[in-house]
Each structure stands twice: as structure tokens, then as C-alpha cells.
Image (cartoon, rainbow, N blue to C red):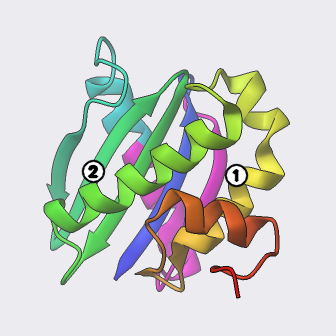
Amino acid sequence: MILAVLFANSDGNILIERFHGVPAEERLHWRSFLVKLGSENLKGAKNEELLVASHKSVSIVYTMIGDVCLYIVGKDEYDELALSEVIFAVTSAVKDVCGKPPTERLFLDKYGRICLCLDEIVWKGLLENTEKDRVRRLIRLKPPVEP
């Protein structure tokens, strides 16, 4: 299960978060843990360079897209390899919506469309769609394939 998808700016402020199957009392711990992990390791990282960590029984894959940090946390069948597929789909969709790797301002300007993309890619903790064209059609409320 994908436990969390979290976007933060370089100062550690949360821009978007989606938790699946994580109790409310544990979410603050995850927010602070992920932001601290990123602040220590993403300084000087190349754009879209994937970094991997593990904490207890979960896997974490994280990266920078432009000025925005992206963290994906999974467990069980969502190991580092599966999470790298998820992070690739999310980064691809964000760059597609923004037209380039986003600055924080551009990311916030496109907030609604990014949330729609995220909901189409990860649904209830499972990877739903990875194809960029399919996600693009779904966020425009069109059928996923032409009749």
C-alpha cells in the first residue's frame, strides 16, 4: 500500500499531502520525519534524482522536481522499485501540468490540476494510472479511451 504522497517546498512547508491507511495521530510524525529526511539529503541533489530510505517496515523514495520536494512512502508490495514507478508517474504528470519542472509559485498556481492528477495516479493507496496520456484525459473528465 502507498501510505503517503507528500509535496513540500525547500523550507519544509507542506504543499500537498495524501495519507492512506495512516492514523491521524501518526501523520505529524511522518510529516516531520520526511521533511527532516529531505532537508538533510536533498541539498545539492540533482533534479529528479531518486533517493531511497527505509524506516521500520516501510520504504521511502523521494526527489526534487524543480523547487519542490516529493516524498512517496509505501509498504508491503510497494518496495523501492514499485515506488520509483509511482514517483516517475507523479513527476511526469506534474511537469506535464506545469510545462516544466515547477517553481513553488508555479506549483501553487497549478495546485488544482496537480491534485486531480495525483488522485488519478494514486487511489486509496494503490497505483491506479501511470500513462501520462490517460491521466491527462481523465483530469479533463473525458473517457480514458476514445469510443
Residue 19: x %, y % from top left? 54, 72
The residue sitting at 79% across, 76% down in the picture is 142
Residue 9: x %, y % from top left? 59, 30
Mark 1 surroundings within 10 Å by alpha-carbon count, few (fewer than 14), some (14 through 19), many (20 or more):
many
Q: Residue furthest top?
A: 44
With 61 as the anchor, is 64 left or right in this view? right
Which of the labelled discs sits on residue 9, or is there none? none
Residue contact at pointers 2 and 1, CB within 8 angstroms: no
Residue 46, compared with residue 86, is above or below; it is above
Q: Earlier in the sequence, mark 2 or mark 1?
A: 2
The magenta segment: 12-34
Q: Please state, as top left, top right, bottom left or bottom right, where the C terminus lies in the image.
A: bottom right
Secondary structure of residue under mark 2: strand
The residue sitting at 56% across, 49% down in the picture is 93
Residue 134, compared with residue 90, is above or below; it is below
User: Which picture quadrant has residue 85?
Assistant: bottom left
Residue 67: x %, y % from top left? 55, 21
Find out whether residue 63 is within the magenta segment.
no
Q: Provide the residue designation for mark 2.
A: 61
**Amino acid on which disc 2 is placed:** Val
The front one of 65 and 143 is 143
Q: Provide the residue designation for mark 1.
A: 114
With 131 as the anchor, is 68 left or right in this view? right
**Amino acid on which disc 1 is placed:** Ile
